[in-house]
Image (cartoon, coloured by chain):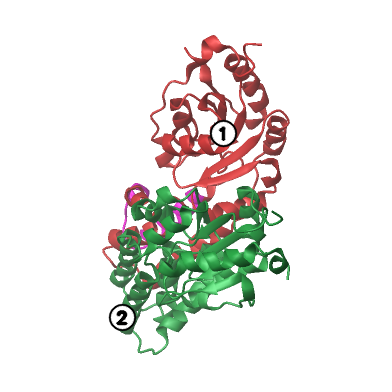
Chain colours: A red, B green
Amino acid sequence: MQNSSGGIALVGFDADDTLWRSQDYFDEAQQRFEQIIARYVDLEDAGKRLYAYESRNIAFFGYGVKGMALSMIEAAVDITGASIRAADIGRIVQLAKELLQHPVEVLPGVRAAVEAVAARHPVVLITKGDLFHQEAKVRESGLSDLFRRIEIVSEKDPATYARLFEEFGVAAQRFLMVGNSLRSDIAPVLALGGWGVHVPYHTTWAHEAEAVVAQGGERMRSIAAIAELPQALQALEAVASDPQVIQP
Amino acid sequence: MQNSSGGIALVGFDADDTLWRSQDYFDEAQQRFEQIIARYVDLEDAGKRLYAYESRNIAFFGYGVKGMALSMIEAAVDITGASIRAADIGRIVQLAKELLQHPVEVLPGVRAAVEAVAARHPVVLITKGDLFHQEAKVRESGLSDLFRRIEIVSEKDPATYARLFEEFGVAAQRFLMVGNSLRSDIAPVLALGGWGVHVPYHTTWAHEAEAVVAQGGERMRSIAAIAELPQALQALEAVASDPQVIQP
């Protein structure tokens, strides 16, 4: 068959807010940060100001809770004109510790959807952020047995995906990524010639929402719930195994 | 030859304080922390107290600069009885940023030694700590082209090495690790039946010094400088390819 080398050969899953709840905890931490700041200054835009620190500090700290906490502390010192009390700084450190310890809550329908995909394709988990925290969450989720490999990377850009495809021994054209972030999960994979299924989450970190998404056209589907994944995958596979559509 | 399956098949290198300077920067940061604390309380043991926070917080934060900075901030709040000023907390955050940005200084003789080993064996780099910071250091070191794989792990214990050996497709008995930490680089590899070359560094973090090292006997060498590595490796290879010594 001329299509035998076509089709999807490997499926990648994002983790935070795709497999389990994550951004809700960050949103809550940010609210608590704003409450602490409100004891010192009356600001409408404390959250926006914090985000400016977080964005700038990604170059120093990368992603994850520890970098967020250091950005919060730096922002708190600056925003309050260095009037914030040590005890409130201590509360921000505790807030980070709690965030690192929250239970892992696997999202509804995830196990069944991953199992359904894994029955037909090898699946890998690709997540960015803090190595230590992400490893703990993978362990706690009870899902790690489903994945052939677990890759924790510092950035999800085309260069990172290209390196992973080489390590996995798969062509971009035969890789499909499932995730909630257009910026990190879908756009870079489409840019390399791969496939994507976007599963939006109800809340998105401002950074991930800053996406310039190439029109995926035939190579991407958006679904409302992870339960729709097997069907979306099948629809994309029909396209993928038609060589006239792979190279439009 | 009956020994054809014996001998060393893969050599792993630690990074911090084996390939490049690292602990010196942490020591300096700790001195600056102690100077900040000294403005509030007169303590002989500020460093020892900080270490108690760092040790306890490894379970929350893992290794690396960001976790160290959060431990410093937590310790500073507690040790000063919450009297530390916000501006001094801000200095601790800056101290972390500087530590994350310091230039990577490859230690003398390292490139030649790694090249000499790489000419005879595939070599991999295995380092623990913060993914984001370690990746940046590997990039900046100019050494990454020498290594077949770069593994950044959250802990260097026997379970981690066992997982890596499986991924590398190598038996522990044919793996040799080079590093400055008996606790992280040598003891776990020897425990699994592998080989080790210990290259002590002039300063060691208290945590890494807390090693219970199995007597490596014939399967370990200590060298004073990395330049002696090729010779030490040869000596161990002579032992490794003698099957009577591999299984004592």
Residue A179's spot in the image, x, y percent? 55, 34
Query: In the rendered structure, which amino acid carries the disc numbered 2?
Result: Gln
Residues packed near mark 1 inside 10 Å, few (<14), some (14 to 19) or many (20 plus): few
Q: Secondary structure at mark 1?
A: loop
Most extreme residue toward the front, as rendered? B1
Residue displayed at 57% across by 25% down: A174
Residues packed near mark 2 inside 10 Å, few (<14), some (14 to 19) or many (20 plus): few
Range drawn in magenta: A26-51
Q: Is B167 left or right of A132, judged from the image as shown?
A: right
Residue marked by disc 2: B35
Q: Is A129 left or right of A140, judged from the image as shown?
A: left
Q: Report the mark closest to the observer, 1 or 2.
A: 1
Q: Quadrant of the N terminus of chain A?
A: top right
Alpha carbon distance from label 1 to label 2: 52 Å
Splitting the image into 4 quarters, where does residue B105 fall? bottom left
Tag 1, which chain? A
Q: How many marks?
A: 2
Residue A194's spot in the image, x, y percent? 51, 25
Splitting the image into 4 quarters, where does residue B220 fall? bottom right
Query: In the rendered structure, which amino acid carries the disc numbered 1?
Result: Gly
Residue displayed at 45% across by 27% down: A192
Residue displayed at 41% across by 48% down: B145
Question: Is residue A89 visible to us here?
Answer: yes
Residue A187's spot in the image, x, y percent? 45, 29
Residue marked by disc 1: A169
Tag 2, which chain? B
Q: Main secondary structure of the magenta part?
A: helix
* Figure check: A68 above or below B36: above
Question: Is residue A99 visible to us here?
Answer: no
* Figure check: B95 above or below A136: below
Between A173 and B181, which is closer to the camera in this rendering?
B181
Q: Is B196 left or right of B72, judged from the image as shown?
A: right
